[in-house]
Structures are given as structure tokens and as C-alpha cells.
Image (cartoon, rainbow, N blue to C red):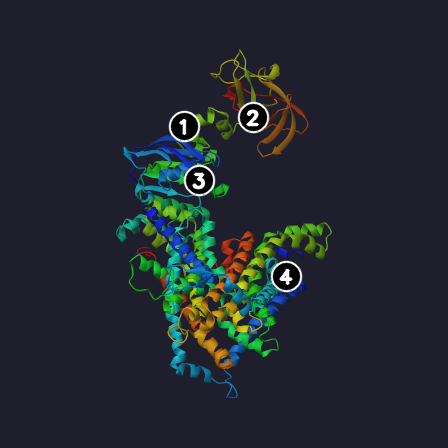
Amino acid sequence: MIASRRGEPRELDLTAVLCLAPSVIYVVVMFVYPFLHGIYLSLRPPKQTGLSLANYIAFFSDEWQYGTIWITFTLAVPTTVIVVSTALFLAYGMRRGIRMERTITTILVLPVSLGVILLSIGIQGFYGSRGWFNQILIGAGLLSEPLQLTNNHTGVMLSLFMQQFPFCFLMLLGYISGIDPTLEKSARTLGANSWIVFRRVMLPLMAPGIAIAFALVFVMTFAVFPSAILLGQPAGATRTIAIAAYHQAFEHYDMSYASAIAVIMGLCQLAGLVLIVLVRQRMIAAPTMGVGKR
Amino acid sequence: MSRTLDSLRFRITKRFGAKVVLDDFALEVRGRQFVTLLGPSGCGKSTALNIVAGLIPASDGELWIDGARIDQMPAEHRGFGMVFQNYALFPHMTVFGNIAFGLEIQRRPAAEINDRVRAMLALVRLPELGDRYPSQLSGGQQQRVAIARALVLEPRLLLLDEPLSNLDAKLRIEMRAEIKRIHASLGLTCIYVTHDQIEALSLSDWIVVMREGIVMQAGPPSEIYNHPKNVFVADFMGFRNFFSGLVNADGELEGAGGAWRIKGRAHALAPGAAATAAIRPEDVQVGADASVNRFNGRVEIVEYLGRENEGVLRLEDQSSLWVHTPARLAPGETVPVTFPPDKVIFLPAEAP
Amino acid sequence: MRGKLWSLALYLFVLGFILNLLGIVTHVTVSAFAKRWFGTPLPPSFTTDWFVYAWTNFDLGRVLTVTVIVALCVVVLALLIAYPAAYILARRNFRGKTLLLLLYFLPLVIPQMTYGISLATTLYGWPIGGTIFAVILANLVPMVPLAIFVLIPFFEQISLNLEWGAQTLGASRAQIFRRILLPLTVPGMLTAGVLILVNTVSNFELTFLVSGSGSQTLVVALFYNVFAGGVRPVYSVDAMALMYMATVLVILLVALHFVRPTQMVFRLDQGVR
């Protein structure tokens, strides 16, 4: 623990290596290795010797299988859009602080802490066709028939919203709070009303945070599993790619095929990320003002 | 050719919860005047400025500009320019973009925007930097861009909130001159907020000294500097030596039991009143001999400042005396000191 | 007035969220105590029989034991592994530090289903597959990095001067560790420990994928019981859900003592800026 000379990055001494070793080894052995092993396994289907893409070909020839990609996208993308825009709306409105902030954040955090299973069971009961939500609406005369909110696409999205919203909101709130408040003040003294302040000053500055929120929520929702089973139609309209992978692994015991599906899932998530990054690059490149270059 | 105003008048009170930050603070600013709100942090000066700008509402009171009442008017419609302590330049826009921002909101034609921004860049002497981003500029340059951005809109009033506090000493002197030059050449009306007495003295036509939301004294710089009316303002203006006592029949200040007597400038305090005498360290004459206000002091600490020495002396009654003198002082020696009576002011005593 | 409309919308949303949450939780609670309930606002009669039913039929005694053992083991092991790593990462800079941080970051940002299948495959390939050890090992994968990222700021807060000062006063490394570092990082360990606890107890995907019938945690067992469909009366499942909820709420109450609500949703906001 001798001071580094002139603050240059120090090399690792024995102590540092010993301290880092357990965690590094653990992550490598229990995360990196299985991950890579999974990819390798996906290329070694049981009936063949050597590497082969048979699993992948099988996946993309079977509509029952490759259809899950589309299904999962139709779940993940709308959910992400709804979650991020709602969170943005709220976080922007609360950027200057709100009364009872701690209470509100505690309440928002509860769904996540309770866990997805409990949430799904509760949604199934409360929003079911015989649940209180429908009973109240029918009793108040707003509906004549119950709304189908569970065992379908909507139910899954509802559960996903409740799980993803708190995190997205808190993240955006933190990000927005980090923007210098005097920027807004100075824009107003220059004649900007609330909308112009939002569009020309705050939004460009929030864009990185929004992009990150979008990316994280998308990646998380794309891997949806228990909600799709408990609140959807796992054998039909909400058979997500995670469910497909699970079936292969634990009902057909075909670990090789299952790994391939997991790889495909990962690639789809990566593709989504790349898309988000590209969109963001496009947004930055666009001129932020009409006049300005010579 | 800025539009100038005739007068800005206000009387405001501001409370944050139970705390009164501005207590019936009243001021009138005439066209082309440079008014400074001077005071320590927390005295309410920035709050007052923000209320004038329309960024926060007053709890009570009114603002009148040229006979029209504007308290309810939102900030974006008031047409006041504002310069902030941390510049508040938009990091995602170029210098040109920052300055052009207000003009774009007014939907001016591109050619006009171009000309006006260029003219402003020339005025603040940064003609080459239009394409840079704020992060690529030095502090002084950023501050000039901030000023240019506010001025390009030809505001009828310019508000400046401690604009020089974030600059180093040398830059501060340069920027002070810059602000003075701009004010003179454009004939702007300005309200300036600072805790620095030198800025206040050099830039202002009128200084308002504030403490905890209350005006302690208001007047032209020479009056504030030479004739402070209370201990707080005197302290702020560099009077560091204070002596408490009672006014005697001759109008002098007397210590307890007549231990010492100080003769000062003419004053209006009645005999028997509790008062404080004050003198600046640089006005104390060291080594001179005189018949009035003569004391002996033992030198405790000496700081060499180049041209002069700053010293702390212990007087006979054990009180401390700050001096600022070209005379040579040696720690431990006892020297005579004199307070020239015309340099001593008498102030009403204040509760500690 | 524009601002007022905005605030109204905000508070309405929060209110809606609260009502939503309350509705969901209360429904489960009422159902757990219902003798029978079908389409009426409230069940016609109540009973506590379903709790007994759930306890005996769902082997809750063993499930709870497994959950407790897993949670405690994960907390202790994660802290042990993460503590020294967090210290070095807080104190030192070195080539490859960013890459290392990225490595630690991956298990937190990649969804558990994406890497869980291959992790399960690997674990089942070893003799411990399907056992409680597998569950512990699997949960450690995201929890070790979580512990590291939570602990790093706590170490950064302890000025290096404190260690140097102790050195100049003659303390050995072991003494500095025991008498200065350890006591000052207790809050950090509590925060990390509590977060790990909440995350492990409520963890679904990883535990689900690697556990066998004898090593299910409470939440995984709950899932199986729901999924078993008509075989299990819904009220008994709700009773079990209520017991799970009570457990988690108790842990949460304790947790919020040590941890800000924002940190509960942690997962990623630490690394994102």
C-alpha cells in the first residue's frame, strides 16, 4: 500500500492479485465458461460428430420455433416503449423534487422486491375476468362484459410493466436530477417556454440516459419467462423464445438445441441494442438547431 | 441600441417554509443604473435576483416596470437577460448556437441571427470561437459567451448573479473591466449580485448592502465606503478594528471606567449612548506621535506583504489592533500607534 | 397552472400505482383466507385451513429450510468473495481495470434466462446438479458482482490517509484490516448483505433452472404449485403466496432500515451514468 509515484496507474502486486482472484475465478468459471460452453454445445447436436449448425437450421425451419422471435418482439418492444415513456413523463415532472419522495420511491420499489411470481399470481387474481378490477368496472356500469386482461398478451405486458417501471423510473429520475438546473433557468430567461425548454435543452441532454433505459428495459423484457407462463398462453400466443429454450432443455432434454435457442435469444437482444445505438447516432447527427453553421 | 427601461420598482418578501429570506426588500432602479446587491452568502441577494427574473415567485409584494405590474408574468416573457455564476452554457450547442438560441426562439430570419451573433462575438472579443463547444473554452471565455448570449437579445435589464466568482483572481480583474466597458458602451441597466466589495465598489452606481434579507445600507459607492452607518457594513468595507464604549460629554468614545478615550469624526450620537468606534488597518499610523488617540501596542504577529506589513498588535487594555503599514515591525517590540480622528468613525453599538 | 396540471397527473399516476399494488396484494390475501370464492366481491366464508393444507401438502417446512440455507450461504459467500475485490478496485488503478469491471457487470446486465440455460447445463453435467449446492452456486453468479459494486463506493469513502496514518503509527496490515477497514465497512457489508438477501429470496429464473425437487426455494415451489394448475386448489396456492409475501415483506422492512429504496432496484443504476 505504498503511494503510487506521481499517481500513475500501479501494476498489480501480489496482494491485489490475491484479492481479485476469487471473484475473477468465480465469474470466469461460473459465468464465462458456461456461456462459451453453451455456444459450443449449440454447435454439437447429439446425432452428429464435429461442429454443425443443425440446431440453428432446425430452429429457423420450424415456425413453431422461429415464430417465438416475433412473439417475443411483440411483447418486448411495446412494453419497453410504454415503460420508458411513462417513466420519462414521471421523472421529468419530478425532476425538481417532490414531497414524500422517499415514500413514493418505496412504494414504487415494492413490486420488484415482492418478485415476479407473487406479482403474477396477484395480477391473475385481481385483473382476472372474475377479479375485483372487472367487478368494479362492471358494477360501476362502465363495462357490460369483463375485460380479458389475463391469460393473454395484455396480462404479460401488465406484469412486465410493473416489474420494469420502478427501475426505469428511478434510473431516469437520477439521471435527470444530474442535469444542471441552471440550464433550464437560463433558457427561460432567453425566452423559452416549457415546451421549448424540454425539446431543445432537456431532451438532448437526457438522450443518453433515455437510450440506456431503453436498452436495459428491452433486454430484460426480451427474456420474459415466468410472466409469459403464468399470465399468458405459453403454448400459444405468448410462447416466448425463453419458453422455447426451456422446453428444449427440460422437457426434451436436448441441451444442445436449448443452448442454440439461448444463443439466438442473446443475438436478438444484441441486435436490439445495436439498433438502439444506431438510432441514437442518427439523432445526435441531426442538427440541433436550424441556424448555426456558417 | 438596447431598449432601456425608465424604472424598475419592487418591494418583495420571500419565505421558504418558516424562514424569512427577504423581509420587505424594496428597491428602485433607474434606467442605465448599475445597482449591486452586496452581502455574505445567505443574505437573500440571489433570491431577490431570481424573483426579479421571474424564476421563483415572491411570497408577498409587487414588481413594477415602467408603470406596468409584472409579478405574474412568467420569466420567458420578461425580456430580462441573466448571467449565472456557473455560466449555464448549453453543453450540446456550439458557442454560436448558444448565442443564437434566444433569437431562434423569436424566429428571427437566419441572416439577421447570423449578423447579430457575429456582432456580439466581436463585442465580447471572441470572434473566432463560434464553432467551439463550451467544454473547449476557458472559464473567462465561457463567461463572455454567457454575457453575449444574454445581451444579443437587447434586454432592457441585465441581471448578473455572481458572474465572476468562479474565475481566478487575475481573470476576475480583466472581466470586471470588461463588464464595465460593456455597461458604459451599451448604456444598460444592470442589477449585479456579489459578495465581493471590490467588485461592488468598482462597477456600481448604487450599492445595496444586505444581511439576512434586510437592507443594511444603500447608497453610492463612495458613501458606503467612507460613511458606513453600522458595524456590519463597516466590517464589510474593510473596517477591521472596533472598540466598544460609551459616548462621553465631549463626544468622544470612552472605555469602561475611562480607561481610554478615542476622538473621531463628527457624529450625531448622544452622550451616554453605547457606541462603537471603527478604523481601517491601513489608516492606523504606526510610530507617529500625536496628542490625540495615542496608544501603545505590543507587536504579536507580522505578515510581510511586500509593499506593506500586516500586523496584529496587543493594546494596553488587551484588545487586538490590526494594522497595515509600510513601517517595519518586529514581533515583541512595543510601538506607539495613532488613530487620526478624521479616520475614525462612530457607529451605533450593536448587540453581539 | 400548467405546473399544477402536471403535478396532478403525477400524483394521480402514483395513486393509481398504489391502488393497483394494493388491489393485487389484497386479492391474494383475501383469497388465502377464503373457504370458497367465485366471482363475488368477497368470499362468503373465511377459513385458515388452506394454510395448514399448504404447509403439509407443499412440504413448506423443507422448502423454507432450503430457502433460508440458500439465502444465508449466498450472503456469506458473496461477501467473502467480493470484499477483497472491492477493496482493490476502489483503491487501485491498473491496466485492464475497465475490462475487469465490464466482466463483473455482465452477469448483472445479461438477463438470467439468457445465460441460465447454459449455466444449468454445466451444473447438471457436474455431480452436484440439481442439489442445493447448485442453487447456491448459481445465485452467486449475479450476487458476487452485485456485492462488489455495492461495496466499492463504501471503500472509496474511506480515505487512504486513514490507512497511511495507521501505518505511520506502526500498525501492520492485519491490524489495519481488523481495526480500521473492517469496522468502517460494516455499513457497506450490511447494505450489500441485505440487497443480496432480498435478491436471493426472490430470485426465480436461475434457481428455477438449476434446482431439483429437493432444492427448491419458496418462490420456485410457489411457481410449481401455481403451474400444477387444477391439481392444487387456488386458495391453497394463494395461502402459500401469502406466506411467501409475508417473508419477503419482513425481510424488506429490515432491509429498508439499512438501504435506500433506490438501491433495492439497484441491479444496474450503479454502473450506468
Report the disc number at residue B162.
3
Write down the residue under mark 4: C84
Q: Residues within 10 Å of mark 2 (few under 14, many from 20)?
A: many
Write down the residue under mark 1: B220
Find the distance from the CA under tag 3 to the CA under tag 2: 28 Å
Mark 3 or 1, nearer chain start: 3
In this view, the residue in front, A101 or B65, is A101
Which chain letter goes with mark 3? B
Which chain letter goes with mark 1? B
**Discs 2, 1 touching: Cβ within 8 Å:** no
In this view, the residue in front, A111 or B207, is A111
In this view, the residue in front, B262 or A35, is A35
Same chain for mark 3 and mark 2? The answer is yes
Q: Amino acid at mark 2?
A: Asn
* Position of residue C107 measured from the top left corner of the image (x, y, whole percent): 53, 67
Find the distance from the CA under tag 3 to the CA under tag 1: 20 Å
Write down the residue under mark 2: B241
Callout 3 secondary element: loop
Q: Amino acid at mark 4?
A: Pro
Please say if A126 is above or below A256.
above
Q: In front: mark 2 or mark 4?
A: 4
